[in-house]
Every structure is written in C-alpha cells, then in structure tokens.
Amino acid sequence: MHPAYSVILFTTASGAGYGLLALLSIAGLLNLVPLDPWLGFTGFLVSYAFITIGLLSSTFHLGHPERAWRAFSQWRTSWLSREGVMAIATYVPTGMFALGWFFDWTGGWVWALLGWLGVVFSIVTVYCTGMIYASLKTIRQWHMPQVAPLYVLLAAATGAVLLNLLLTVFGDARPWSFWTAIVLLASAMLFKMQYWVAAETDSKSHTAGRATGLGRFGKVRAFEPPHSTPNFVMREMGHRVGRKHARTLRTLAVVFGFAIPIAASAMLLLSSPLPSWLWATVATVSGAIGILIERWLFFAEAQHVVTLFYGEQEA
C-alpha cells in the first residue's frame, strides 16, 4: 500500500495523545502525581493538541474533506465511524475531568467517574483505530489479531514517554513513571517483532489461481497487463518496498522507537550528571522517529489482494 503521510501523522499523533491522556488520568486518580493545576493543565493541553492535530490530519487523505462529517453516521457497521464517534465522545469526560483537576474540584465520586470514563474512552478509541485496518480481509498483513492490540500498546508506550517528559519538566517524576515507560516500551517492541514474524510466516492464501478460479488447471498468469499506463489502483494498492529496505527500516524502528527510549528511560533511574529532562527529551524525540518509521512500514509492507490482477502471484 502507498503510505499516506496524513494517515501516518494521524495514527501516531492521536495514539500518543490518547496514551498520555489515559496515563495522566490514571496517575491523578491514584494520587501517583500531585494534583498541581498547572501540571494537569499542561498535560491535558498537550494530549488534546496531539489528538486534535491527528484527527484533523486524517481528513487530508479524503478526496472531499468537507464530507468527513458523514462518517459519523455509519457507527453500526464501520470501525472508522465508531472511531470518530468515540474520539468526539472522549472530549466530554476528559474535558470535565481536566477542569476538575485545574480548579481543584477533585476527591468526589463524580470526578473519579469522569476520569475512569476518560481512560476507557481513550483506550476504546485507539482500539477502533486499529480495527479499521484489522477488519480489512483484503489485506493479509492487516487482517491479523495482533493489529488492534498493538495499536493500543504502542499508544500506551508513546504516552508513557510523553508523561515522563512532562513530569521531569515539572520536577514531579517518580521511579514508577520510568518503570512504566520501560515496561510498556519493551512489551510493545516484543509484540511488534512477533507481529513481523507472524506476517512473514503466515500462509498467503490469496493467489491468482484462486482469484480467477483457474488454479486447478495449473499456474495462472495474466496474458496482458490490465492497463498500459499506471492508474490509481496501481499507485495506491501496488506500492512495494524492497525486502532489503524493509529489514533495514525495521531495525531502525526498533532502535529509535524502542531501544533508545528504553535506555534513556533507564538513565532516569540512575544517577547521571545530565539533567533528567534531557534524557526524557532524548526518549521522546527518538521514540517519535522510530514510531513514524514503524507506522510507515505498517502501510508500505501491506499488499492488497487486488494486486493479483496486476501480475502478483500471491498476496
């Protein structure tokens, strides 16, 4: 598949925003961080900025962005519509929870209920994002049980890295936040590597012979190409990334997206002559680079079944 930069920005930015939103809410509800008004204000502002930028960027991939509102009407059958509905719904409890944090209206059951609702809504929204791709049977690399949980885990890991940066800037970082980031990053890395192995070893059940119904007569190939010049389907669905380049990019994704952020987060647990905010910044910047590479690969390595009619033997 041809990677759309707007969708890459959407899935990475909104995922990090929802991850930070959920983890910050949990930390506030469990009294793991001081309920400082400006800590809460900054944290929720950063979360909403990432989420909103991501959601708006997703409309850039549409032929008619002004019609994006119509997606909300198909929530019964469409995961994209469910994601849109949940994304908007999440603003309500989290916004009221943030106001309670800022104006010191905390401690009551209503405030706690709003906080936990925001956590659940954030997780469900990211899960819906993953299911947009996992529900597509025409793309084998996406139609896998690991995809949606992986989206949630990556959102939590990137959110934890952002939370570390926020807490170190405010001087409120604690060992639990460093360990949370390390555990989530390591889990996401192992889960992502397992996904890559599964995607490579999974049997390619879609073949040209099966698609045409002529497989029983032997190997099927096209007598002539369907088009004499490249068309939209070939550009969007037939994008290919070389195996050598894919492996190199996977390595870069692991190094920048997981290894360096884990090492930088571990340095926050140790005595270091460098300030803690610097290590947290290294983890955040490196993680952002790595996750962007990972998400680009997620789209670039995907092969749509329609490519069988353009010369591919299996998908």
Image (cartoon, helix red, strand yellow):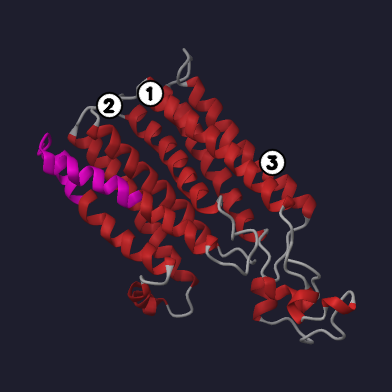
Residue stretch in magenta? 95-122
* Among the two numbered marks 1 and 3 on one chain, the one whose residue lies closer to the N terminus: 1
Which of the image's four quarters has the C terminus?
bottom right
Please give the label number shown on residue 251. Answer: 3
Question: In the structure shown, which secondary structural element does the residue marked by tag 3 occupy?
Answer: helix
On whether residue 103 falls in the magenta region, the answer is yes
Real-space CA distance between mark 2 and mark 1, rounded to the nearest whole angstrom: 9 Å
Please give the label number shown on residue 176. Answer: 1
In this rendering, the answer to whether 70 lies above or below 181 is below
Residue visible at 60% across and 49% down in the picture: 294
Query: What residue is pinned by disc 2?
Result: 32
Residue visible at 59% across and 67% down in the picture: 137
Report whether 99 appears left or right of 304: left
Question: In the structure shown, which secondary structural element does the residue marked by tag 2 occupy?
Answer: loop
Q: Circles 3 and 2: CB distance less than 8 Å?
A: no
Q: Position of residue 313 (x, y in %)?
A: 81, 70
